[in-house]
Amino acid sequence: MNKTFCILPWVHFFHDTEGYIRPCCNARCKGSNPIDQRVTYNTMKDYSDHMDIINQPAFNELRNRMLRGEESEECTYCYEVESHGGESPRLSKNSMLDLDKMINMEKINEMTNSDGSLKDFRMKFWDVRFNNICNISCRMCGPMWSHTWAKEEEIKINGSYIINAHDTDKFKEIVSKYGPLDELYDVFFAGGEVLFQKEHWEMLDYLIEIGNTDVMLNYVTNLTKLDYNNFKLLEYIPKFKDVTLTVSLDATEDLLEYIRWGSVWGDIVNNLNAVRNLENVHLRVNHTTTLYNLLSLPSTIDFLYDNEYLNEEYDIDLSIAPEPHNHVGAFPLGLKEQAKEQILKSKYYPLLKTKLDAVIDTMLNTTYDFPKEYINKLDKRRDCDITNVIPELKPYV
C-alpha cells in the first residue's frame, strides 16, 4: 500500500453541519471556515442520489491520485500528523482493510473506473453530523459545531442559531441520500453533541428497523447527559452488538469546566460510572490537546488510568487542535520545557510514549503567537479568568 492511499473515499463520505461534503472530517476542503477555502466539493443540498455525491469530479480525482501514490491537498492534516510520528486518521482507517464486512484492495480495484468514479457505492463507514446542536461551548469549538456557541456570539444563519445539513427534517428523506445501509459496518456519531439531536435517535430506530444491529456504534460525546426527552441511551445500548463511547475529556474538575464551558464535572463522572461496566460498551477518551491543557495532561491521564476508566494505550487519543489560537505551538515559550518535563515524568509515559512524544514534538517544533487577546476577550464575555485554572499563565495574559 502506498503512502497516500486511504480507504475512506471508497466506503465513506462526510459532510459538516452546513452540508458541505468532504472525503472525511479532517479533509481540507471548501467550507464556511476561512481556513478551509481549498478544494471544492458540493453540499448535500445539491444532490438527491448517493451515487452523484460519491462520483462528483473532486472525489474521482482524489481517488485516482491515491491509487497513483500522489499527495492531495485535502489530506494535508494526515500528512502533518504522520510527519510528527503520530497515528493519523488515514492510518487508523486503513487498518480496516480486509476486515469482514468491510472492503479489500481487490474489491476497490474492481469497483473503480479509469476516471476514478465508482461503479457502485455502499456506505461502510458513516461519520454522522446532522446539525450543530450542542449543549456546551468548548474553547476549541465554534458556532458551526455548537448552536450554544452561535447563541453566545449572536450568529444566526437563515434566522436561526441551529444549522442543518439537510433542507428537510423528515428522517426517511435524509437517510435516503446515503444509499443502502444494509452493509454499514461502522457508524461514527459526533457533534455538535449527538445525544441532544433527535436525528440520532431516529437513526438508531432506523437501524433496528432494517435489522442492522450488528453495526458498530462509535460515539464522540461530552457525556454530560445520557438521555434526550423520552429517549434513553442506556435502554438503546443493549439492542446493539458493539458500542464504543469516546468521551471528549480534556482535563478534570474546574479546568474541564473552563475548557468545555457549560459542562459540570460531577455529572460527567457520574455518567462515566454509569457506562463503564456495561457488557457491550468500550470506553475511550478523546483528549483535544491544546495550549490550555498541556500542563494538566499528566494529571488527566492519571485520573483516567488510576481509576481504570481506561486500561490500554489505544483507549485514548491525543488529538492536537489545529487552530493557531488553540494549538500547542502557541503555548508560551517559557513554559514549553516545563510541560515537556512534566509529560516525560508521567508514570504512564512508557505506556503512551508514542502519543506523548508526538505532542511534545509538535509543541516544540511549531510556533504560533500566544493568543492573549482572544483569551481575554472570551474570558470577559464569560466572566471567568484563565489564571484561576492555569495560574502559570498569569505573566502572559
Image (cartoon, rainbow, N blue to C red):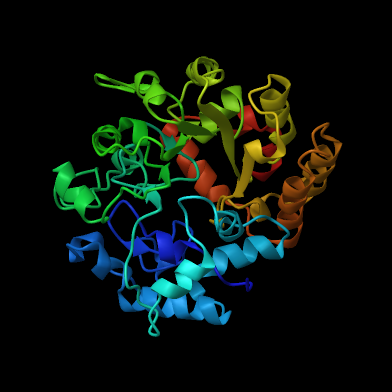
Determine the image quadrant of residue 214: top left
Could you tell me residue 91's position as x and y percent?
A: 61, 59
The residue sitting at 50% across, 26% down in the picture is 280
In this image, 146 relative to 84: left or right?
left
Q: Quadrant of the N terminus?
A: bottom right
Between residue 138 and residue 286, name the one nearer to us. Answer: 286
Vertical placement of 294 versus 330: above or below?
above
**In the figure, is residue 245 to the left or right of 135?**
right
Quadrant assignment for the C terminus = top right
Q: Nearer the viewer, residue 296 or 12?
A: 12
| Residue 232 vertical position relative to residue 120 in the rendered view, above or below | above
Res. 117 image quadrant: bottom left
Tell me if residue 169 can be seen.
no
Q: Position of residue 350 (x, y in %)?
A: 84, 39
Can residue 207 be seen at all in this image of the molecule? yes
Percent position of residue 370, x then y: 63, 53
Q: Residue at x 66, y 40 (%)?
A: 314
Outermost residue, bottom direction?
114
Residue at the spot 73% in from the left edge and 21% down from the top edge: 306
Numbered-mark total: 0
- x and y, in percent, of residue 320 in the image: 61, 50
| Quarter where residue 200 is shown | top left
